[in-house]
Amino acid sequence: MSVDGATRDAINAAADPGRSFDEWRQALMALKVAESRGEPYATLLRRSEDVIRARSVLTHERVQAGLRVPDDVLEHLTVDELLLGQPDDRVR
């Protein structure tokens, strides 16, 4: 049986409910370290995308688990998803 990436992520999340929180926290720390080291813009952009994706997964999982989140959090999630779908601004 073939399993797509989203299904695999859901299975993994069910097996370890704290995993998505840990991945978000690790992504955020990697971004902060990159910023403090003065890493190149491309690295900061990639790290920022990692944070947004991890936060999106975390929020979706928490909502599916029954967590009631404020409307503004859901609005930010929508904006994050729109931003991730935009072309890379490095290619101007």
Image (cartoon, rainbow, N blue to C red):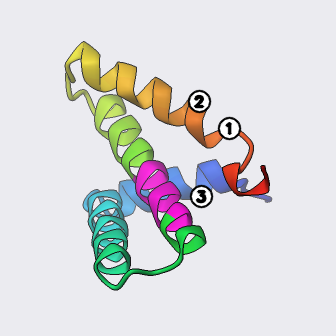
What is the three-letter code of the residue carrying label 1? Answer: Gly
What is the three-letter code of the residue carrying label 2? Answer: Leu
The residue located at (72%, 53%) in the rendering is: 4
Q: Which residue is mark 2?
A: 82
Assess whether residue 61 is covered by the magenta stretch. Answer: no
The residue located at (60%, 69%) in the rendering is: 42
Label drawn at residue 85: 1
**Residues rendered magenta in the picture:** 45-54
By secondary structure, the bulk of the magenta-drawn segment is best described as helix
The residue located at (79%, 55%) in the rendering is: 91
Q: Position of residue 12 (x, y in %)?
A: 46, 62
What is the three-letter code of the residue carrying label 3? Answer: Arg
Q: Quadrant of residue 54?
A: bottom left
Q: Are marks 2 and 3 in contact (CB under 8 Å)?
A: no
Could you classify mark 1 by the number of other residues whose Cα lies within 10 Å: few (under 14), some (14-19), or many (20 or more)?
few
**Discs 1/3, front:** 1
State whether residue 2 is above or below residue 61: below
The local secondary structure at tag 1 comes to loop
Q: Position of residue 57 (x, y in %)?
A: 43, 46
Name which of mark 1 and mark 3 comes first in the sequence: 3
Q: Are marks 1 and 2 in contact (CB under 8 Å)?
A: yes
Name which of mark 2 and mark 3 comes first in the sequence: 3
The local secondary structure at tag 3 comes to helix
Q: Which residue is mark 3?
A: 8
